[in-house]
Every structure is written in structure tokens, then in C-alpha cells.
């Protein structure tokens, strides 16, 4: 068992630049990491405060109907569902995509323990999210209900087990996808397609369940029934924490732990076979020289970058899921009204928001699809090739921007045209709807490059460390989010002013920032890249 | 072809990896760069090829400062690192074509040179396979071919013979001699002293970041073997 912890610790130390922060003696580097920690802490506190506010508002409603237990049930279900969703597409990468596979597997450690350490890595990361949702909800519950002393130890104990089962469920799907893909020649592409199919399937499935029940809007006992039906463990959890039932507590823990042990043992038996299937490249060794196609250096860099992007299912899934959501939603709006869709996805005022703030709404998905924030880190040991090549650094960096725009721009344009039709926007609104997301696409792509230049992580053993857990990706997401929240706040505060004028102002401002960033990439970007 | 003037590289914390190094590699030279592990060979080589930034001194390639015009310097230089990590997501031919594009090699030249060196290193049949399926030696061969297809004036190699099979190592030595007889220059590090002694017309020995001795191979080794000279220099402070 100690080996599971040792392996997990080593993996976690490489996340978020943690080990570097602990051991660096460089003052500048320390200051940078301190600043980064503070900004992440601010982000976490902001989310926790928002979560507390949300729980508090919900608690008022549940207080009226005398069902405060629903607060914990809903929050537990939300934590589990989000944990499940965010784990499906990274499970395969965490389980099988690490460079030190040979080293780890040659150690005198059971394969099931290696699997357990990979699952625990996912668990620890999900625990942070669970903490931000469950802790505020638990505090609100305690304030409102004033429960007995048993509530606190029961709440804390069960909290540790909440993320486990959703992660295992998602990891089973991830491992199954990997197992099926490993049997094909184009295993990576198959894995990518299968994951997309599963995610879209679950998305559509969850819409359907909500649609049939049609109960989320009216707060009644039906709501509790639905949550408990969808996720029976929520009922067990509520019985344990709110009613102090020791049997439920033990059952909840036992199910989670047994599922974990069973999964790691079973996967342990097929682990090597799946890994071999996924990593073995097909080699025909029958190449005969053919005429070669020449390209300009920029085009060559762009093609190389695009191939790099497509070669990693984790990279594609992580950075294009937002665009897929946008596309699915835009297509849905063609067939169902925005009012109906708002009901289905639990945002009743969606129709109003969409018609007013559609450009910012689309931009949110665009900024979520930032490929550049990890593109330099992903060069890793290959960086010497670009650094020793006779091409300007500007071309290298802009080729990465161009790939990001290739991912975001076409889907953004297609989605916006569909939104124009479904929302019946006027010509000025249509123009803004088309242009604002494109400006944000440029903004997000260039910002990602700059942040990655400032916070590179070129030494990694698993792509997950770079794509999901690097400081650069987190900071880029935070900046992207703030860059949308501020304009959104301005639009809502100045609701009496012409919305188009505000959007135009926002567009001009972001364009100005883009031109400053472009200049920065040309000058300082060159130096920062050289210093890598 | 290559002039290193007062090159000094300090790492964070103030420790000098290389201290005031001066060296001249002329056209036609096969210049061996020898030293123990951590002596500063790779640091110097990485600075020469423009991969590593440095503060003190200057490095000129074909009369151009790497600090002032790095792109022009790199256009005439080829570099093969000690452990060639090449893009796993490309096929061998895609990688060579990519390098051809970056160095603006003409279509005719790149096709004929890839064919020639691919056949020489017996790797042409594998060029359609993903690099991820290559062995270490095959990656090394691919890196060598990518360095040769743009006909560099200066070829810089870091431990080039590690991982190569005997036939490929022999082929590389032949190519190095051919390249220099056509007016190019080669600067390479090695731990294989026999090879350095036979192949190089000039040798430099570095210890703890400082150049201990340099010059024509026969002048450096005198009547002794290169191994004796090297061990004596390394053992004595």
C-alpha cells in the first residue's frame, strides 16, 4: 500500500509546478511561483465564496419546504456529475499516457498498485473541486439546521469518499475506450472519436432525463426523488450525514472503497496489454521515395503543429470540448426554442440572456478552447529542433496561434450563423455575433502563448501534467474567464444603455489588447522563447 | 567558420559551467571537443547552435554573431544533439520534409539527398513509419540525415556515435570527412578517444569549464596517445 502512496506523491509533485516551487533557489522563480499561488488561491476563494452564496440562496428555498437535506443531496450530486464528466476525457491520458511507464513498470510494484496510483491522482484533483462545492454547502447546512455533534465527523468522513465512485465510473469508460482503441491500427483516432461519442451521448441523455421529468423548476419532493433515482448514493449520503445513520455511512464508504479495489485489480490484469496496444506504432517498413511537397517555413510549422494537436486525444478533447458544446447547443436551438432549452438545462432566463449576450456567450466557449496555453510546454524535449532552426521565433509562436484559430474560428462561425437563424437577430446584432467571438479567439490564442512563455513546463512525464494541470493552463483560463466576466458585468450593470454599443466598445477594447499582444509576441516573445 | 570568443556561461546561483572559452574552427576542420562528464561540452555546443542563451563573450559562425543574427547563423549550421528527441507524431519522411522546409532546401536537392543518405544509412524503407516506432539508433540516423540535407557549412554534433551500429558509425565518419573536404567544418564532442584521435585534425580538451589545451591533434598528443594526454590533464589540477 505504501507504494501506491509513493507513486501518487511523485506524480502529484510534478503537477502545477509544485516540486519546482518547493525546491527552486532562484529568487525570481520563487516570486513568480508565489504570485501564481496567490492568484490560484484568489481564484479558489472566489469560487468558494460564489459556491457559498449559491448554497445560501438554495438553502432559503429548501428551508421554506422543510427539506434542507436536499441542499446536501443536490450539491453531492453536482460534485459527482461534474467529477464524472471532467474525468471521462482525461482518464485514458492519466492511466496510460505517461512517459515513465517503462521505469514504473520495471519496479517491484504490483500492476494493480500502479493503476491505483493513477486513479488516486485523479481522485486528489477532484477532491479539490469537491472541497469548493461541498464545504460551503456543509457550512450553510450547519448554520441553518444547527445539527448534532455527529454531523461534523460524518460530513468530513463522507466528503473524502464523494469523488471516488464517479471517478471510477468515468475511468471504467476511459479504460474501455482505451481497450477498444488499442485493438485498432489508428488507436489514437479511434479513442478520440469514441470519447467524443460518449460525451455527446451522455450530454443528450441527460437533457432527455430532465426533459421527461420536468421537475427541476418546481421545488418539491419530486426533486429529491429524481436526484435519488439518478444517483442512489446521494440517498445513502443524506441518510448518513443528515440522519446520522451509521449503517448508511458504512455502506457508502464500503461501496466506494470496494469499487476502487475491484477496479484497480481488474484493470491491473489487462493494463500491460492495453498500454502495449495503445503505444505500439504500426511499422510497415515499405517506404519508397516519392515526390515531396515543399512549403514555406510558416506553413511547415503550422502543419507540424496541427499534426501534434491531432496526435494527442487528451489535447484535442481538453481544448475542443467547449467548441463541441457550442456546436451541439447551436444545432439544438435550431430545433427547439431557446425558452425550452433554458428549461432543459436549468437556466430559465436563457432566452433573454442569449438574445442580449450571445456574442459573449459564444466567446466563453471560444476562450475555453485555448490550445496555445500548453503548446510551448508540449514541445518538451523536442524544443531543440525549433530553437536550432533558422526561423524567426515570431513565426514559431504565430504558427501555434494559427492552429488555435483553426480549431475555434470555423466552429464559431458555423455556430454563430445557426444562432443568427434561431435567435432571429437583426443585422447589427448578427455582425456583432459573428465578429466578437472571432476577436476573442485571437485574444485567447495570443494570450495563451504569452502565458505559456512566462510559465513554461518543458520537463514532464505525462501530457496530462501539461494539458490539464500546468500553471500556464490554469492562469490562461483564469484570465480568459475574467476577460469575459468583466464585459458581462458591464453589460448587465449598464442594461439601460444600448447593448450593441456596449458590445462594440468591448470588441474595440479587446482588439486593442490583441494588437498590444501581437507586438509583445514580436518583440519580447522572441526573447522569452530564446530563454526557454 | 566558427569563432568562440571569451564565451562564459553561468548557471543560476553563479556557478560557471564554462569560463572564458576561446576557440577557432576553420573551414575543412574536423574539430574534436573532449572532456569528462559535466565539463561544459554540451553547454558550449548548445550555445554555438543558438539553443542556449549566454551573457558573456560572443560566438561567430561564418563571420556572423549568433547574438546579432541568430537566424542567419542557424541557416548555415546543422546540429545533432546527444539524445535526438524527434517528433514522435510525425513519420520519418514528414520530419525530413519539415526540416527541408525550415531550411528552404529546394525540392530537387531534398529529394535526392534524402534518397542518398537514406540509402547510405539503410533507413529509406522506414521513412514512411511513425518516428514513435523507431529505435534509438534509427532516430539518431534520422537526425543525422536531417542535418545533412541542407548542406551545412558548420556541422555540430554532440556525442554522435552513441547508439549507432558499427556500419552506421563508419558511414558517418566517411560523410564527415567528405563534408570537410568540400569546405565545411565539423565541431563535435566525443568520449570515444580512439575515434577523435583518428578522425580529428584538431582537438580541444575542456575541464571544469576551462579549456586545458587545444590545437592540431599531433601537437596536442605529441608522442603519447590521446588517451594518455587526456587522463593526465584530467587527473592533474
Image (cartoon, coloured by chain):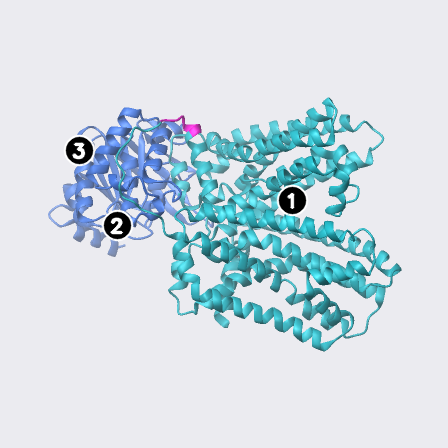
Name the residue carrying label 3: B178
- Frontmost residue, B46 versus A59: A59
Q: Is residue A17 visible?
A: no
- Frontmost residue, A233 versus A121: A233
Estimate the x, y position of residue A1 in percent, counting from the top left: 50, 72
What label does residue B163 carry, if any?
Answer: 2
Asked whether B194 falls inside the magenta stretch, the response is no
What label does residue B204 carry, if any?
Answer: none
Asked whether A297 falls inside the magenta stretch, the response is yes
CA gap, disc 1 to disc 2? 45 Å
Q: Nearer the viewer, mark 2 or mark 3?
A: 2
Q: Is residue B226 visible?
A: yes
Q: Colour of chain A?
A: cyan
Residue A87 quadrant: bottom right
Estimate the x, y position of residue B209 in percent, counting from the top left: 33, 47
Badge 3 local density, few (<14 within 10 Å), some, or many (20+)?
few
User: Which residue ends up furthest to the right in the rendered image?
Assistant: A64
Q: Nearer the viewer, mark 1 or mark 3?
A: 1
Q: Which chain is blue?
A: B
Amino acid at each position: 500500500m505504501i507504494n501506491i502512496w509513493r507513486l501518487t506523491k511523485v506524480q502529484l509533485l510534478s503537477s502545477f509546478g509544485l516540486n519546482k516551487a518547493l525546491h527552486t533557489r532562484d529568487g525570481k522563480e520563487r516570486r513568480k511561483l508565489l504570485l501564481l499561488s496567490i492568484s490560484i488561491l484568489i481564484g479558489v476563494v472566489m469560487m468558494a465564496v460564489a459556491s457559498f452564496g449559491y448554497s445560501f440562496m438554495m438553502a432559503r428555498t429548501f428551508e421554506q419546504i422543510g427539506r434542507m437535506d436536499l441542499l446536501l443531496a443536490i450539491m453531492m450530486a453536482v460534485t459527482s456529475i461534474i467529477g464524472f464528466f471532467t474525468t471521462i476525457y482525461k482518464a485514458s491520458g492519466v492511466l496510460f499516457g505517461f512517459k515513465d511507464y517503462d521505469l514504473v513498470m520495471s519496479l517491484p510494484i504490483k500492476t494493480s498498485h500502479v493503476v491505483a496510483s493513477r486513479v488516486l491522482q485523479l481522485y486528489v484533483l477532484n477532491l479539490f473541486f469537491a472541497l469548493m462545492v461541498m464545504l460551503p454547502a456543509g457550512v450553510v447546512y450547519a448554520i441553518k439546521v444547527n445539527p448534532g455533534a455527529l454531523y461534523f465527523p460524518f460530513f468530513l468522513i463522507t466528503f473524502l469518499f464523494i469523488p471516488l465512485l464517479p471517478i471510477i465510473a468515468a475511468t471504467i469508460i476511459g479504460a474501455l475506450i482505451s481497450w477498444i482503441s488499442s485493438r485498432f491500427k489508428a488507436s489514437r483516432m479511434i479513442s478520440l472519436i469514441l470519447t467524443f461519442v460518449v460525451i455527446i451521448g451522455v450530454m443528450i441523455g441527460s437533457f432527455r432525463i430532465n426533459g421527461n421529468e420536468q421537475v427541476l423548476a418546481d421545488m418539491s419532493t419530486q426533486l429529491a426523488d429524481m436526484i435519488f433515482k439518478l444517483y442512489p448514493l446521494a440517498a445513502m449520503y443524506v441518510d448518513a450525514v443528515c440522519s446520522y445513520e451509521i449503517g448508511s455511512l458504512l455502506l457508502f464508504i464500503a461501496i466506494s472503497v470496494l469499487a476502487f479495489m475491484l477496479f484497480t485489480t481488474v484493470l491491473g490484469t489487462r493494463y500491460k496489454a492495453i498500454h502495449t496496444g495503445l503505444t505500439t506504432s504500426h511499422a510497415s517498413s515499405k517506404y519508397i521515395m516519392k515526390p515531396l511537397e515543399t512549403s514555406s517555413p510558416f506553413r511547415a510549422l503550422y502543419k507540424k503543429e496541427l499534426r501534434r494537436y491531432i496526435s494527442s486525444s487528451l489535447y484535442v478533447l481538453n481544448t475542443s470540448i467547449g467548441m463541441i458544446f457550442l456546436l451541439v447547443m447551436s444545432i439544438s436551438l435550431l430545433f427547439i426554442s431557446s425558452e425550452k432549452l433554458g428549461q432543459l438545462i436549468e437556466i430559465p432566463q436563457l432566452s433573454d440572456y442569449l438574445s442580449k449576450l450571445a456574442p459573449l456567450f459564444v466567446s466563453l466557449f471560444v476562450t475555453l478552447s485555448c490550445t496555445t496555453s500548453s503548446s510551448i510546454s508540449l514541445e518538451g524535449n523536442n524544443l531543440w529542433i525549433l530553437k536550432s532552426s533558422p526561423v524567426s521565433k515570431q513565426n514559431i509562436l504565430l504558427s501555434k496561434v494559427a492552429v488555435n484559430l483553426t480549431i475555434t474560428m470555423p466552429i464559431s462561425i458555423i455556430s454563430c450563423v445557426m444562432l443568427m437563424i434561431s435567435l432571429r437577430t437583426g443585422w447589427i446584432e448578427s455582425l456583432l455575433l459573428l465578429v466578437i467571438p472571432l476577436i476573442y479567439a485571437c485574444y485567447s490564442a495570443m494570450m495563451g502563448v504569452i502565458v505559456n512563455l512566462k510559465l513554461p513546463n518543458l520537463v514532464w512525464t505525462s501530457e496530462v501534467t501539461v494539458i490539464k494541470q500546468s500553471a500556464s493552463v490554469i492562469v490562461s483560463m483564469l484570465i480568459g474567464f475574467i476577460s469575459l466576466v468583466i464585459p458581462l458585468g458591464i453589460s448587465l450593470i449598464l442594461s439601460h444603455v444600448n447593448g450593441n454599443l456596449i458590445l462594440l466598445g468591448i470588441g474595440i477594447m479587446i482588439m486593442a489588447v490583441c494588437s498590444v499582444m501581437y507586438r509583445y509576441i514580436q518583440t519580447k516573445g522572441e526573447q522569452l522563447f530564446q530563454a526557454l | 567558420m566558427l569563432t568562440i570568443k571569451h564565451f562564459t556561461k553561468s548557471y543560476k546561483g553563479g556557478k560557471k559551467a564554462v569560463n572564458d572559452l576561446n576557440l577557432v574552427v576553420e573551414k575543412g576542420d574536423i574539430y574534436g571537443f573532449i572532456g569528462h562528464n559535466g565539463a561544459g561540452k554540451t553547454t558550449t555546443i548548445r550555445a554555438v547552435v543558438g539553443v542556449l542563451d549566454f551573457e558573456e563573450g560572443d560566438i561567430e559562425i561564418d563571420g556572423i554573431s549568433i547574438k546579432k543574427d541568430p537566424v542567419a547563423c542557424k541557416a548555415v549550421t546543422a546540429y545533432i544533439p546527444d539524445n535526438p528527441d524527434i517528433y514522435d507524431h510525425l513519420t520519418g519522411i514528414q520530419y525530413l520534409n519539415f526540416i527541408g522546409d525550415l531550411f528552404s532546401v529546394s525540392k530537387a536537392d531534398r529529394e535526392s539527398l534524402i534518397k542518398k543518405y537514406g540509402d547510405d544509412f539503410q533507413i529509406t524503407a522506414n521513412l514512411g513509419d511513425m518516428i514513435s516506432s523507431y529505435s534509438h539508433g534509427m532516430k539518431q540516423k534520422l537526425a543525422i540525415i536531417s542535418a545533412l540535407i541542407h548542406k551545412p557549412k558548420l556541422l555540430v554534433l554532440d556525442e554522435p556515435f552513441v547508439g549507432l551500429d558499427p556500419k552506421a558509425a563508419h558511414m558517418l565518419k566517411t560523410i564527415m570527412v567528405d563534408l570537410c573536404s568540400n569546405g565545411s567544418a565539423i565541431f563535435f564532442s566525443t568520449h570515444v578517444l580512439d575515434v577523435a584521435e583518428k578522425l580529428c585534425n584538431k582537438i580541444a580538451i575542456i575541464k571544469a569549464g576551462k579549456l586545458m589545451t587545444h590545437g592540431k591533434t599531433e601537437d596536442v598528443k605529441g608522442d603519447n596517445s590521446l588517451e594518455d594526454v587526456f587522463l593526465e590533464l584530467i587527473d592533474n589540477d
